[in-house]
Image: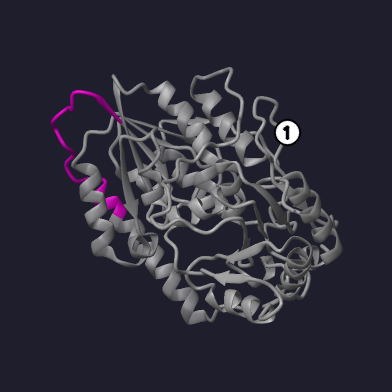
């Protein structure tokens, strides 16, 4: 559906307002006091899966900026900032509500005042697909003496935005053109910062124990993916889950983000009386969700954060992938230095792969053809092989 002219006008007005506001705040006084340690601001405002994939590189940054000399502060998306605070590589985590940051001038100004009250020695934006009004804006306003970023790409911004925002950095690190798996892209950035021999490994995610122990064994199913075109049909999930129950008598726990409750309810209703299922969609915190995945036998889901969390906590997973970002987030590369299970990625290649989910086929409100081509039979075979390997009887 095409946005209305009034919607486009409002969107442009908000962007223009924020751009002018940021320019004024960038002129405001900075803190004069120099802390005992050099302060490094890491800017990472993207989604949960991006953060989890980046943790391996973040641990490397901790080695590059040791705690006896540097204080490492992460400015992160509020969606996952509580989880980030549990990780050992950060001294401090500041959460940003991106909706408020974009829509509320008061919220935006308060964040700028908070950042400019600190004396940042270095600000680093490791994101390759930069966002002009978000992470680039932080670099512009934070007042750091040295501001480092990636040369980046045009996945999330236009050429003129990139041309302007490039000037806000004191150093831009080279980024190889073309599709590169995110673990390797993050490693490329770390090497550019100075760890020349750094190679990517699976991230390691620190997750707390569940407050109430969950009966085991079980597997986790995540049928949502944010957009209908990226979600394998719910009926197909139900078919595979029936087969798993009939063969293994293994309980399924349906999970998902707030807003995905209708998908969870639909899946549970399709399986009523046919399999043991518990729906926890929208009722778990992110750390609880990660703990559920860590303690599960396997994860079955679309290309979403659940697959990356599973890899980071050592749980086997099956990813049902379309072609929108193929090669960037899945499949995972073979990592010689890591013996943990990699996600099993199931896909059916089409000539239109790597469309950035700007699908050329008529699929408004429905699943994209590339994902729909993944069959129930091949998912069932992959699930059976994985569960047999895990020793589930």
User: In x, y percent, where is residue 109?
Assistant: 24, 56
In the image, residue 38 above or below residue 204 = above
**Observer-nearest of 111 and 95:** 95
In the image, residue 329 above or below residue 60 = below
Q: Which residues are magenta?
A: 22-39
User: In x, y percent, where is residue 25?
Assistant: 24, 50
User: In x, y percent, where is residue 81?
Assistant: 38, 50
- Picture quadrant where residue 222 is located: bottom right
- Residue ID for mark 1: 334
- Residue 329 seen in render: yes
Q: Residue at x 51, y 42 (%)?
A: 127
User: In x, y percent, where is residue 85?
Assistant: 35, 44
By secondary structure, the bulk of the magenta-drawn segment is best described as loop
**Observer-nearest of 31 and 10:** 31
Question: Quick check: 26 left or right of 135?
Answer: left
- The quarter in which the N terminus is drawn is bottom right
- Picture quadrant where residue 324 is located: bottom right
In the image, residue 121 above or below residue 31 = above
Whether 129 is among the magenta residues is no
Q: Residue at x 28, y 38 (%)?
A: 143
- Residue 225 seen in render: no
Q: Residue at x 30, y 53 (%)?
A: 22
Question: Quick check: 137 left or right of 303?
Answer: left
**Observer-nearest of 357 and 162:** 357
- Neighbour tally class for label 1: few under 14, some 14-19, many 20 plus, Cα within 10 Å: few
């Amino acid at each position: 559906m095409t946005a209305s002219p009034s919607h486009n006008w409002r969107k442009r007005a908000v962007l223009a307002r924020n751009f002018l506001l940021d320019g004024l705040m960038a002129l405001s006084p900075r803190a004069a006091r120099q802390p005992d340690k050099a302060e490094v601001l890491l800017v990472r405002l993207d989604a949960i899966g991006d953060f989890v994939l980046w943790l391996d590189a973040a641990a490397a940054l901790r080695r590059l900026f040791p705690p006896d000399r540097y204080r490492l502060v992460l400015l992160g998306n509020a969606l996952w900032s509580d989880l980030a605070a549990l990780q050992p590589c950060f001294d401090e985590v500041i959460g940003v509500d991106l909706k408020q940051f974009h829509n509320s001038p008061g919220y935006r100004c308060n964040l700028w005042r908070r950042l400019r009250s600190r004396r940042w020695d270095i600000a680093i934006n490791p994101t390759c697909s930069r966002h002009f009004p978000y992470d680039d804006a932080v670099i512009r306003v934070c007042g750091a003496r040295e501001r480092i970023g990636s040369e980046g790409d045009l996945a999330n911004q236009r050429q003129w935005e990139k041309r302007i925002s490039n000037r806000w950095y004191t150093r831009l690190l080279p980024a190889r053109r073309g599709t590169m798996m995110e673990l390797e892209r993050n490693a490329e950035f770390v090497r550019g910062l100075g760890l020349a021999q750094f190679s990517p490994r699976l991230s390691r995610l620190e997750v707390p124990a569940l407050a109430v122990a969950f009966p085991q064994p079980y597997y986790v199913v995540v049928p949502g993916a944010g957009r209908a075109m990226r979600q394998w049909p719910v009926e197909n999930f139900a078919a595979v889950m029936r087969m798993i129950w009939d063969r293994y008598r293994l309980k399924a726990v349906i999970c998902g983000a707030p807003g995905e409750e209708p998908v969870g309810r639909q899946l549970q209703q399709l399986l009523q009386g046919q399999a043991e299922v518990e729906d926890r969609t929208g009722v778990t915190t992110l750390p609880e969700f990660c703990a559920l995945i860590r303690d599960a036998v396997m994860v079955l889901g679309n290309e979403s954060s659940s697959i990356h969390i599973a890899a980071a906590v050592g749980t086997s997973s099956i990813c049902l992938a379309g072609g929108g970002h193929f090669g960037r987030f899945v499949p995972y590369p073979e990592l010689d230095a890591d013996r943990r299970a990699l996600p099993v990625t199931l896909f059916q290649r089409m000539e239109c792969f790597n469309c950035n989910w700007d699908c050329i086929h008529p699929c408004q409100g429905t699943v994209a053809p590339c994902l729909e081509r993944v069959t129930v039979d091949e998912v069932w075979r992959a699930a059976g092989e994985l569960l047999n390997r895990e020793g589930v009887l």
